[in-house]
Amino acid sequence: MTSGFFDAIAPVSYEGPDSTNPLAFRHYNPEEIVMGKRMEEHLRFAVAYWHSFAWEGGDPFGGQTFIRPWHPQDSMAKAKAKADTAFEMFRILGQPYFCFHDADVRPEGNSFAENLKGLEEITDYFGQKMEETGTKLLWGTANMFSHRRWMAGASTNPDPDVFAFAAATVKSCMDATQKLGGQNYVLWGGREGYETLLNTDLGLELDHMGRFLSMVVEYKHKIGYKGAILVEPKPQEPSKHQYDYDAATCIGFLRKYGLEDEVKLNLEQGHAILAGHSFEHEIAVAAAEGMLGSIDMNRNDYQSGWDTDQFPNNVPEVALAYYHILKSGGFTTGGTNFDAKLRRQSLDAEDLIAAHVGGMDICARGLKAAAAMLEDGGLEDALAARYAGWQTDSAKAMLQSNLGDIFDRVLAEDINPQPHSGRQEILENYVNRFV
């Protein structure tokens, strides 16, 4: 079936950098070879079901602005109409993957059994659509933050019945993800944190969250799921302080509960900004620890204090993100998910296509710039030169030494180091040559 929502829009094609067509790719050519691999295989684009189809255009100060034929999603008929529209858009864009939460794709029931029935029915419907279009699932996840039952958390909730409901929900979503061949399963703890410490047992909640994630890993192995388990950091909003604050916090959490070899990270640009970091920082931290899994590509409005989830439009930022991704070996099961939404005044079907076209072009430009920098080797040469002293025999021996011996050497050799230029402006100018 077709919904008719995109009837006036033809499939998007690559027309090259001179094109002025807003619904054509100027830089994203899926067949172009970059560092020995097709661009499509590097970027592994995915459309986020929640922002593109479930979101109704609200913000913290105003309600719905998008009036779509499937809003509100209060029946399986509307859920299937939404799916028809989604897969029409996937056909138009030609991106290889999509992602979804359970609550995005089925109506909210009055019981867990009703939710399960709806999820299983739409999973079968998705399976047919995926077979028809060739679109694959990058990852599935569970929405455990929107419904009022989750207002005090899911795995960290003080009510054990909510923990149980959350566990059952995740099992059902993992089953759906496996059935659809999803390459990853993501957990974002939107309410896994606290609003006040006056009534929060922080240690107990962290232990419950650790046990919950361990159960997820145990179930993955029980059902033979071959995909990756990913967690997504975010510092705040909706909770005042979330336990999965940033990449470093999540890595420490995973190590505390013995999950560092089982779970990797799904990193979002907007969340990095909210944590006071850059996207490249979060990616570099995860990559350094061998825990980079996948990314959510978007941007924030730097004048707003919340997660605005806008489509990316900053080539230098994106290029540095992909630089660290490529340097770490590139994606395996992960990819580039557009966790991005239209502005609430962008009402038309054409806006939704154009937003993704622009985002895909920005990522393509960033990828090519990152590859060019890596192939040129300027940043790696500067890095090697800065740390060259640590390659000497005396420096390596010092790391195996002790404070007393180092003290004696400094006195005996009259070591009196002088600072060296960090050359930051020169390196920034170097990057600008490529972007």
Image (spheres, helix red, strand yellow):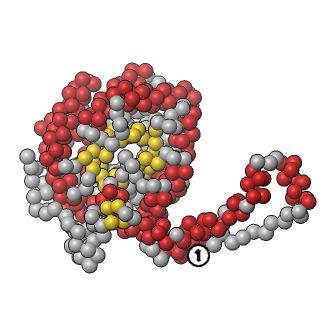
Can the viewer see residue 63 in this picture? Answer: no
Residue that mark 1 sits on: 426
Q: Determine whether, in the image, residue 141 is placed left or right of residue 396.
A: left
Identity, as a three-letter code, of the amino acid under mark 1: Ile
Residue 103 image position (x, y, % from top left): 27, 37
Q: Determine whether, in the image, residue 163 is placed left or right of residue 380.
A: left
Q: Residue at x 45, y 74 (%)?
A: 434
Q: Quadrant for residue 229, please give it.
A: top left
Q: Quadrant for residue 348, please give it.
A: bottom left
Residue 433 image position (x, y, % from top left): 47, 77
Q: Residue furthest top?
A: 161
Can the viewer see residue 414 in this picture? Answer: yes
Q: Residue furthest front?
A: 393
Residue 358 image position (x, y, % from top left): 30, 65
Q: Residue at x 49, y 45 (%)?
A: 291
Q: Residue at x 67, y 63 (%)?
A: 387
Q: Is residue 195 above or below residue 92?
A: above
Secondary structure category for the residue under label 1:
helix
